[in-house]
Amino acid sequence: MITTANLRKAVRGARSTIKKMEEDGVLQPVAIGGNGKGGRHVYDELDLLAGGLAVELRDRGFPRPTVLAIVRWLRESSLEALRLDWAEGRSLIFAVGENEPCPVLLSHAAVFQNDEVDLAEAFRLGVPVAVVDLASLYRQMQSRIASGGEQ
């Protein structure tokens, strides 16, 4: 289980960021307890990945509705299912612009050795583009918690 403090370290966000992510459904605490105002929230590993992905996509200029659609897709999966895909070489989320996202995990070759994908042109046009390696992002989020948010 992941505490709010550790989740904040991982996503490098303020309490207000975590609260907004909860309101948007990006984060879904698995337990709320304690006697204090709002209680103590505890999160699972999928929250860690969902929060990291949301921040990554927003940092790359994607609008909130697109970010939320991609995170909803992620939340429909389990970490175990994602790990099976990662083991098969499918760990990349590919999103372009403000188009309705159709998230699917892809291999490196499917994104970078595909004649129908012109990343250079998208960048030239100033369109938001994201190729996010979920396996790598997950490890990075875990590492930030382990190092106290220093990475």
Image (spheres, grey):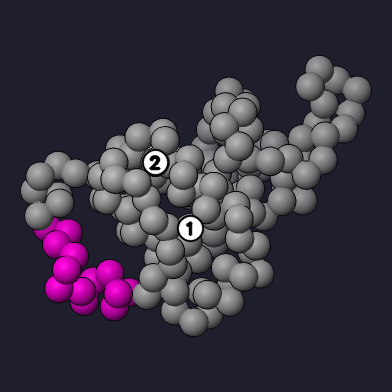
**Is 108 on the left-hand or right-hand side of 144?**
left
Vertical placement of residue 14 versus 102, above or below = above
Tell me how far mark 2 sits from mark 1, CA to CA. 19 Å
**Where is mark 1, residue-wise?**
137
Mark nearer the viewer, 2 or 1: 2
Q: Do the residues bearing badges 2 and 1 touch, measured as CB atoms within 8 Å?
A: no
Q: Picture coordinates of residue 106 (x, y %)?
A: 39, 70
Residue 127: percent from left, percent from top: 19, 44
Q: Outermost residue toward the bottom?
A: 88
Specify whether residue 18 is in view.
Answer: no
Q: Is residue 146 left or right of residue 112?
A: right
For numbered disc 1, what is the local secondary structure? helix
User: Sequence-wise, which precedes: disc 2 or disc 1?
Assistant: 2
Side of 54 where 119 appears, left or right: left
Image location (x, y in percent) of residue 112: 23, 71
- Residue positioned 54% across, 62% down in the render: 139
Residue at 51% over, 47% down:
71
Give the x, y percent position of residue 131: 33, 58
Q: Which residues are magenta?
A: 108-120
Q: Amino acid at mark 1?
A: Leu
> Which amino acid, mark 2?
Thr
- Residue 94 belongs to magenta span: no
Q: Is residue 78 above or below residue 47?
A: below
Lateral position of residue 69 relative to residue 51, left or right: left
Nearer to us in this view, 1 or 129: 129
Numbered mark located on residue 66 in the image: 2
Q: Is residue 99 visible?
A: yes
Q: Give the answer, above or below, for where 40 lies relative to 46.
A: above
Of residues 60 and 122, which is closer to you in this image? 122
